[in-house]
């Protein structure tokens, strides 16, 4: 089971399609606050996928709280250009799985 917090609709659809094809069940949270509540209420996902598109103000605070409450060994953070601070905070919390946005499909294998 994957808990996904992805605000960008295109990225969310891309990630959802790939994970579902691989047979994973996806639970989509509306935001970092909802994801934090799900984790605090006993949800134990195999992966927490966090893509914070705005790392400013209230959203940044919610994202920081989620990063602290999510299991570091099961958390992947997706950050775009200009969000190096988010990746640094994640690394400081022991999160070892950063991805850079934009996510793109891998090239087709050449047979």
Image (cartoon, grey):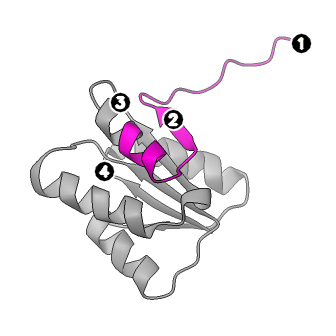
- Magenta region: which residues? 88-111
**Alpha carbons under labels 4 and 2: distance apart:** 15 Å
Q: Earlier in the sequence, mark 4 or mark 3?
A: 4
Say if mark 3 contacts mark 2, CB within 8 Å: no
Give the structural element (helix, strand or loop) at label 2.
Answer: strand
Give the structural element (helix, strand or loop) at label 3.
Answer: loop
Q: Earlier in the sequence, mark 1 or mark 3?
A: 3
Residue 108's place in the image compared with 40, above or below, is above
Q: Please state which of the two labelled residues, at mark 4 or mark 3, is closer to the viewer.
A: 3
Q: Which residue is mark 1?
A: 111
Mark 4 neighbour class, 10 Å CA radius: few under 14, some 14 to 19, many 20 or more: some
Q: Please state which of the two labelled residues, at mark 2 or mark 1, is closer to the viewer.
A: 2
Label number found at residue 80: 3
Residue 63's place in the image compared with 84, above or below, is below
Mark 1 neighbour class, 10 Å CA radius: few under 14, some 14 to 19, many 20 or more: few
Q: Residue furthest right?
A: 111
**Alpha carbons under labels 4 and 1: distance apart:** 36 Å
């Amino acid at each position: 089971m994957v808990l996904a917090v992805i605000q960008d609709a295109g990225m969310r659809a891309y990630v959802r399609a790939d994970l579902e094809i691989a047979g994973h069940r996806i639970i989509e949270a509306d935001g970092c606050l909802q994801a934090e509540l799900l984790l605090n209420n006993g949800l134990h996902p195999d992966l927490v996928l966090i893509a914070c598109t705005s790392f400013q103000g209230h959203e940044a605070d919610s994202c920081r709280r989620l990063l602290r409450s999510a299991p570091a060994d099961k958390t992947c953070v997706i950050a775009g250009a200009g969000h190096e601070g988010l990746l640094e905070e994640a690394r400081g919390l022991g999160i070892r799985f950063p991805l850079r946005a934009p996510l793109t499909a891998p090239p087709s294998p050449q047979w």
